[in-house]
Image (cartoon, rainbow, N blue to C red):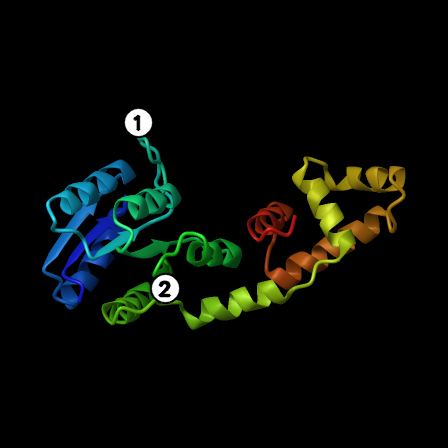
Amino acid sequence: MIDKVLIAEDHESANLSLQRTMADFHVKHVDHAFYCDEALRKIGLAKGKQDPYDLLITDLYFEPDGIAQRIAGGFELIQSVREIQPDIMILVFSSENRPATIDMLYKNYHVDAYVRKARNDAKELKAAFEVLSRGQRYQPRSLSDSIRRSNAYEFTDFDINIIRLLSSGYQQNEIPVYLKQHGIKPSSLSTIEKRLNQIREELGFSKNEQLVLFCKEAGIF
């Protein structure tokens, strides 16, 4: 049963949505933190008093406002919280929509639930809370399908070569010269452009920068 919750969120509108969800489930004790440092401090104090939180709900990205913070974002907050209280449940509530990043949250950061800030997120928050209340992890089916599609995509050696070059700072129109110098075929600009367009379309990206970040996070190179 979830009786004590800490919400780490710097946007008031999202905070209100989370508060309504907690009220619907009659959570007895709900605290708030607008900064990651503040959230970590509250979790540490509660643990020290032997009155720990059952659930941390956190965003991934916090906007800087000029106040210096040791912990600037949700990724580092999750890691730090796990060191203090390994058994706390963690629900990430964020606008992040990249499948590889969200998959990493489950695999590397061991979060218990992820809910995307979007239309109908209140409904999904309730669904996630119900699953967490039963001591289970929550992963939306739509997310599972998206991750499965992304993981199923097979990158060729040529794909990896040109994406790695983009990652290294090469402009798209500079890549043909590099490929020709190293005897890599095909090497025409039209082939490179066509291939990158195909990959982006398949994975649902509109920019090369998104594709590069996806490949880095997915460990493709």
Which residue is under mark 1?
Answer: 68
User: Residue 140, position in %: x, y?
Assistant: 40, 69
Does the rendering let one see residue 210? yes
Question: Which image quarter is the N terminus in?
Answer: bottom left
Residue 132 image-quadrant placement: bottom left
At horizontal 36% and vertical 64% (from top left) the residue drawn is: 119
Image check: 69 left or right of 161?
A: left
Q: Pointer 1 and pointer 2: residues touching (CB < 8 Å)? A: no
1 vs 2, front mark? 1
Q: Name the residue type under label 2.
A: Arg
Can you say whether 110 is above or below 129 in the image?
above
At horizontal 58% and vertical 68% (from top left) the residue drawn is: 149
Q: Looking at the image, is mark 1 or mark 2 earlier in the sequence? A: 1
| Label 1, label 2: how far apart the Cα atoms are | 33 Å
Which residue is under mark 2?
Answer: 119
Number of numbered discs overlaid on the protein picture: 2
Does the rendering let one see residue 34? no
* Disc 2 crowd, CA 10 A, few/some/many (<14, 14-19, 20+): few
Q: Residue 83 carries which label?
A: none
Give SS at disc 2.
loop
